[in-house]
Image (tube, coloured by chain):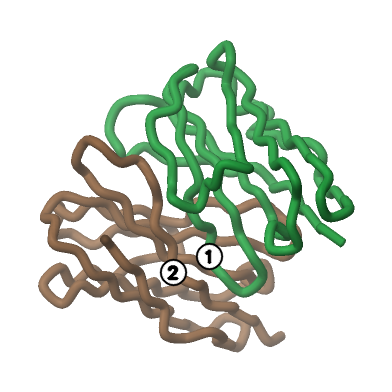
Chain colours: A green, B brown
Amino acid sequence: DTGVSQDPRHKITKRGQNVTFRCDPISEHNRLYWYRQTLGQGPEFLTYFQNEAQLEKSRLLSDRFSAERPKGSFSTLEIQRTEQGDSAMYLCASSLGGTTGNTIYFGEGSWLTVV
Amino acid sequence: AQTVTQSQPEMSVQEAETVTLSCTYDTSESDYYLFWYKQPPSRQMILVIRQEAYKQQNATENRFSVNFQKAAKSFSLKISDSQLGDAAMYFCAYRTGGAGSYQLTFGKGTKLSVIP
């Protein structure tokens, strides 16, 4: 069990550029989540996949954000035309299917700094 | 919408002592789950303990236990025999038990310092 892995761990980009983050969930997990965490705050839900289907999206996920999970395994989160307000840690998590009480396992996060 | 409130931004405890972190939540649902997560500095968030709302018995995991008061919508975490490795941000989180939403709603967190 290698856990949830995220890449890159840190990204500094200029305002207006596009960035993409990748998440590899725990191999047998069919549920995958993206959260955003800013300094001094708890994580905020962005979106959720069950297998390759994106079943839930937060209002935080503006049209500059797009998430995919094409084969039901890894996922990508792309932010287009980045803004300084996008600076945050982007957390990926995964869990087994079944009840909503199943444990959600988090990755170490991808830090984004927009300058 | 559900909300989770952690009223203690920072707490400290002497090594080997006991500390209690507070959490309250607001919901109209009867079926839900509550969690405490630990986030050490620059490390990933890990689950400390979980409580199902339909269970009256408080959850316990080794040195960690909760005081779940459903009527009061309170879910506090007690850490006994505190260790240096317990120093971290602790987040309380809520998740519906019903179908339709799988998101976790987090509080703002409590930073716990352990004094040697």
For disc 2, the chain is: B
Q: Residue at x 70, y 34 (%)?
A: A5
- Residue kind at label 2, given as amino acid type: Gly
State left or right for residue B104 relative to residue B31.
Answer: right
Looking at the rendered structure, whether the residues under marks 1 and 2 are on a common chain is answered as: no
Residue A89 lies in quadrant: bottom right
Q: Which residue is mark 2?
A: B107
Secondary structure at numbered mark 1? loop
For disc 1, the chain is: A
State left or right for residue B114 relative to residue B62.
Answer: right
- Residue A20 lies, in percent from the top left, at 75, 35
Q: Residue at x 52, y 46 (%)?
A: A61
Q: Is residue B88 above or below residue A58?
A: below
Residue B115 lies in quadrant: bottom right
- Residue B92 lies, in percent from the top left, at 42, 65
- Residue A40 lies, in percent from the top left, at 62, 74
Q: Residue at x 89, y 53 (%)?
A: A14
Cα–Cα gap, marks 1 and 2:
6 Å
Q: Which residue is mark 1?
A: A42
- Residue kind at label 1, given as amino acid type: Gly
- Residue B97 lies, in percent from the top left, at 22, 44
Q: Is residue B113 above or below residue A50?
A: below
Question: Which quadrant holds the C terminus of chain A?
Answer: bottom right
